[in-house]
Image (cartoon, rainbow, N blue to C red):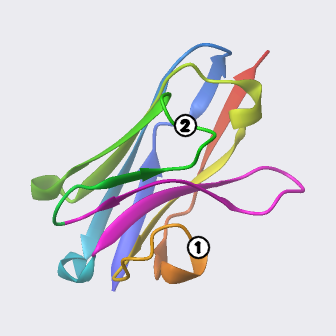
Amino acid sequence: QVQLVESGGGLVQAGGSLRLSCAASGRTFSINAMGWFRQAPGKEREFVAAISWSGGTTYYADSVKGRFTISRDVAKNTVNLQMDSLKPEDTAVYYCAAGNSRYYYQAHNYNFWGQGTQVTVSS
């Protein structure tokens, strides 16, 4: 009922920036939160950032605070993740997620997921 498509991943040197976007379609009226998770090889999927859809309140993992900024464009049904001061440890597949829960930090509270986009940060 909700489809998510990520874009904007790529290869960047340490200290550089990337901007990820996620476009939602379908029954988007049911969305309370949208977030970003990431997963590196051999690692569990981890929370990166989230935003409440109605109020725009933002939430960040400690590892990205001050470097990443999540935002939304309600009219375009789009959520963005501006990633600055990238580090090699940020390398992962980044997934966009949407859900009707207000528990933002746990992956199981999200109902819909994008296909993922690769972010690689070279040292």
Nearer-the-camera pick, 64 or 94: 64
Q: What x and y, as percent, mark residue 12?
A: 63, 19
Which residue appears at 85% of the width and 52% of the height? 41
Q: Is residue 57 left or right of residue 16?
A: left
For label 2, the residue is 9
In the rendered view, does 46 fall on the left or right side of 108?
A: right
- In this rendering, which labeled residue sits more in front, label 1 or label 2? 1
Work out how far the residue at label 1 is from the one at label 2, CA to CA, in angstroms. Answer: 21 Å
- Left or right of residue 95, residue 118 in this image: right
Q: Amino acid at mark 1?
A: Ala
Disc 2 is placed on an element classified as loop
Q: Quadrant of residue 87?
A: top right
Towards the viewer: 101 or 19 = 101
Residue nearer the viewer, 1 or 86: 86
Dot 2 amino acid type? Gly
- Pointer 1 with pointer 2, Cβ within 8 A: no
Vertical placement of 104 versus 119: above or below?
A: below
The disc, 1 or 2, on the residue closer to the chain's N-terminal end is: 2
Q: Which residues are magenta?
A: 32-53
The residue beneath circle 1 is 107
